[in-house]
Image: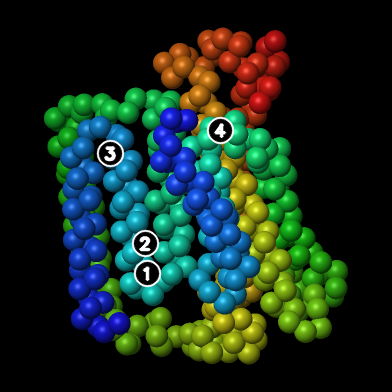
Amino acid sequence: MSMSVSLMLNFGLLVFLVAVALALARWRHLFPVAMLTGLFSLLSASLFTVLSAPDVALTEAAVGAGITTVLFLATFGLTRAREKPVESSRRLIGLAVTAITGAILIYASLDMPHFGAPDTPVQEHPLRHKYLVESQHEIHIPNTVTAVLGSYRGYDTLGEVAVVFTAGMAVLMLLGRGRRGRKRTKE
Amino acid sequence: MREHTVLRIVSQLVIAPMLLYALYVQFHGEYSPGGGFQAGVILATAIILYGLIFGVEAAREAVPPTLLRVGAAGGLLIYGGTGVATILLGGNFLDYDRLFDHGGQHYGLIIIELGVGITVASVMIAIFYVFAGRGRQDDPDSDEDHGSADDYDADDVS
């Protein structure tokens, strides 16, 4: 893919992301909001694909556009599907917080390296050679991401799986079995 | 949702390839994008789609909640157990080279990715069951402590 096509795709996807975000902020009914957050995730996944990060794109598409949307919809079954009206004084506070946070983030982004710059730590750090070249001889696996996640950073991934497990158990205890157990003791 | 013929037929066509794709992402993760986490989420998405179209009860029969609880803990145990096994074989924790004479890293990665996939898929489906089950049986406006006993009995049978 030539640089200009890639840049145009990036630009187009970012414009769509902003448009979806603005639509999200305007809508009061939460069903379209859930659908638009799914669309937002799908656009992000496309952006990750253009940026050559297919592993992240797969996760974003499946979790963000798939499961999160379903969980939002399931939550609407439990609560109201319409946003509560907010008084105007609190709206001003929200606007101020959003504007200040946005300004800080934009200011911080000025320190980041330029898009595709060759002299960033990602390109120049010695670990880059270790992961991208030597891992092929040490781990014998073409997908460097899997080699890094599973082998070089195996402890971290074990911790992540423990986090997923713990979060799942917490949800089950809060909403699932614990509730039934409490009822049984009452009976 | 039984009256939506188009939705039903299309999802019938789509669910099997989704499950196959999850297996591909799981076991081909060393060569192509993906791995245990992505495969687990895709598998969970297929089951959740089944639950949305054909009802949560049908999904519960296909993938029982007990199996999910075992799977969530079992996947983590497979991962941690691999680490303990490498210690018992005389190496460091998660030192896959100790597992086999040749290609120990490759086999080790396949095993731990399988553990990741099982845990992630089980947790995602279990969370969906809990959310969908509450929506089906509880009146959203009633306070939880004042719910009628019938709700909970129906919950217990399932």
Q: Secondary structure at mark 4?
A: helix
Tag 1 residue: A49
Of the residues under marks 1 and 3, which one precedes in the sequence?
3
Closer to the eye: label 3 or 4: 4
**At 63% from the left edge and 68% from the top edge, which residue is drawn?**
B27
Residue A45 circle label: 2
- Inspect the image, locate mark 3, and give the three-letter code of the amino acid beneath it: Pro
Residue A159 circle label: none
Of the residues under marks 3 and 2, which one precedes in the sequence?
3
Name above or below for residue A174 compared with residue B33: above
Of B64 and B131, nearer the camera is: B64
- Inspect the image, locate mark 4, and give the three-letter code of the amino acid beneath it: Val
Tag 4 residue: B56
Q: CA distance from mark 3 to mark 4?
A: 23 Å
Of B14 and A62, nearer the camera is: B14
Q: Secondary structure at mark 3?
A: helix
- Inspect the image, locate mark 1, and give the three-letter code of the amino acid beneath it: Thr
Q: Secondary structure at mark 1?
A: helix
